[in-house]
Image (spheres, rainbow, N blue to C red):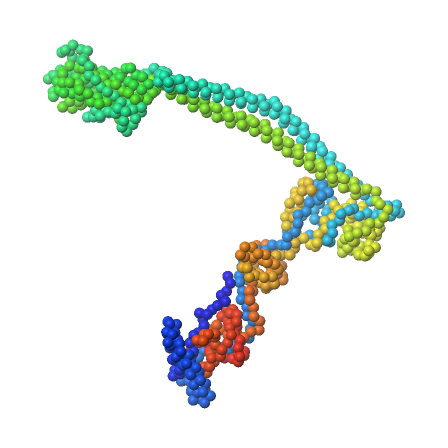
Amino acid sequence: MRQSTQDAHKFRTAVPHTPGTLAAMVKETRGRLRAGHPLLITLLAAGAILGGVLGALAATRGRSRPNASGPRLQTTAVIRTNLSTTASFQGTIGFTAGRTLSDPAGGTVTALPAAGRTIGRGEPLYWVNDQPVIVFYGGTALFRTLRLPLADTRRGAAPEGPSPGVLAARQTLESARLQVTADELTLRQSELQRATTGRATLLQARAQLRTDTAALAAARRELEADQQLGCPAASPATVGSRALTGGPPSGTTGTGTSGSGARSARDTGSGSAGTQPGSTQPGATQPGATQPGATQPGATQPGATQPGGTVTTPAPVLPTVGGEQDSGETTTTALLTGEVTPGGSDTVYHFVYGTSSAFGRSTPNSDAGSGADPIQVSAQLTGLRPDTTYVYALVASNAYGSANGITESFTTATSSCAQQRQTIAGDEQAVAQDQLTVRGARASVSSTTETDREQLRADRAVVRTDIQALQQAQRDVAPPSTAQMHGLDVALVAQNLAALGYFSGATTGPDLAYTPALAAAVRRWQVAAGIDPTGALSPAQVVVLHGPARIAAVRGTVGGHATAPIVSLSGTTKVISFSGSGDLRPGQPVRVSAAGGVPVAGRITSVTPSGNRVLAQVRVSDPGLLPASGPVGITVTTQSRPDVLAVPVEALLARPSGGYALQLPGGYQLPVRVGLIAGDLAEVSGHGLRAGLRVVTAV
């Protein structure tokens, strides 16, 4: 963070004084000025001038002496020093940008360097076909094969022509062509499989899809037909029974539902009851019935349930119920019947029913009369669910209590529409599965064939590259001309071999040529480097760089093709990058420090605008003191003032008329100009200032 360049709050605005002087009055009224008393400004200015004059006269005549018991003045000396301000940033260490290399001559990569290593002149950068590729320094790359002219060859010069390179290129090309042949065979097999097995699977899946689609359409048509017929029953209703668990609640009310309420009539059903004359003769006693005023042996207490559904009670007589039956069930209706003996009292009855032993629903209360003989009762249930089992019981009550019948059950008929809906759901699921099978079969056949085609195209591209490499190798062994070779590439080879100690002849000049002496130097160098010693030098044997390079990253793999990227290079100079404010400029001094390291001096080398900030790069004087990578702290010198006079900021006194002054121990205020403020020191200049001058800093 940039340090503040203004510390005005530290400036004193009062004149240090001793008691009894006019300056004391000035100091005492200074606070009032800050609060805003414009009438005091003129008085204060006049008083300050008068006090300064009187003080100077008193000091000259020796009449004004400090009171020995008064406060002492704290003073400091004006110093001469170098001032500067700084700003701090966070940056990262890297290396100068380089380039990525590949070998246009082709071949197989057989060895690679380690990342982070620095490669210099004469060192192998990588290996292709077990031949090293050596680093030369220069500004122009080799663009042809350098060799001796034909006349020098006939005079006994070393044989030329890298025939091993031609053989290696031919072997690589032959392997690539064999691979293409294998790819073509694989593709034909894939196409044959697609035409037989794959296509048969696809056709079978499509046939199944058509069958299931037709079945689905037929089921939907049948559902429409059944709906027009009112969804007739597809299977008969069944009748069963089960024991009553706990019986219907005593005192069950007769409030039933008829199409409205908590559940719809379709889900819960509704019922209507009716009373029919009993089938027995007057005076006859039905099984389980109780004669008025008589008590039968083994009679139960009021509300008990008799086997067979007939309830008997002593006087006062409770009603009895029994003979529950159901008949006429359809998909949504049922007729419930039973028998009630009123027992001589006004009696009502209703049926409770539902899909569980809790019942949950009932028919409305119906009048059973007050006779002593049993009567047949019934209730019609509607709005039931198809293919659903219901339980029910008959409940009768009079003034003396209620009687509950046994629990019976029935199952409504199955609706043809319900069956058709189930069939449609199954057919829809089958159709969806068939569609997935068809898509999978189609994708499997096409993807296998397309993968083989892509592999064939890639291997054919390799063949084309290997053909170019073979052509280059054949050019290397072409019959040499009878004229000597001249040019920048000849000078580059001579200079590098001279730097490596293999050549002592001329390395520059218009007459420089590829002579037998230079060819002999090339041959000696090839032996030492592990290259076939032909005396001729091809572009595939060297890589020309501007200087030492660092292996930034290894891109290729051993066994990979050399025409693909092999290595990425970077410069060997460490560069620190950071983002800073827009006032940074090249040449500014900096200090760079890593965690736990010693700060290293450097300078900003470049500044690139980036929005409202800049991207700056720094180079340091001793890169070895910094790590190879990682975060660093950067301190930039933003302003500097060498060899200036400076005082502590607390010594500056703000003058009422503007500007600043330094107060001498005798009370005199020396006007000064304030320059750079760096930390607790302020640059000052003005008439009468000198290094060593004592000035007041505080009272």
Q: Position of residue 463 (x, y in %)?
A: 71, 36
User: In the figure, residue 298 lies in which quadrant?
Assistant: top left
Depth check, front residue: 592 or 385? 385
Depth check, front residue: 136 or 484? 484
Question: Residue reaching furthest top?
Answer: 281
Compared to 56, does 299 lie above or below? above
Side of 269 where 478 appears, left or right: right
Side of 549 where 266 appears, left or right: left
User: In the figure, residue 277 lies in which quadrant?
Assistant: top left
Compared to 433, does 503 lie above or below? below
Question: Residue reaching furthest left?
Answer: 293
Compared to 12, does 351 lie above or below? above
Q: Position of residue 546 (x, y in %)?
A: 70, 54
Q: Position of residue 223 (x, y in %)?
A: 40, 19
The residue located at (43%, 20%) in the rendering is 220
Compared to 350, does 14 lie above or below? below
User: In the figure, residue 162 lies in which quadrant?
Assistant: top right
Q: Is residue 126 visible?
A: yes
Q: Position of residue 106 (x, y in %)?
A: 72, 41
Q: Is residue 112 visible?
A: no
Task: Report the quarter where the C terminus lies.
Answer: bottom left
Depth check, front residue: 699 or 123? 699
The residue located at (59%, 54%) in the rendering is 629
The residue located at (53%, 80%) in the rendering is 688
The residue located at (48%, 19%) in the rendering is 214
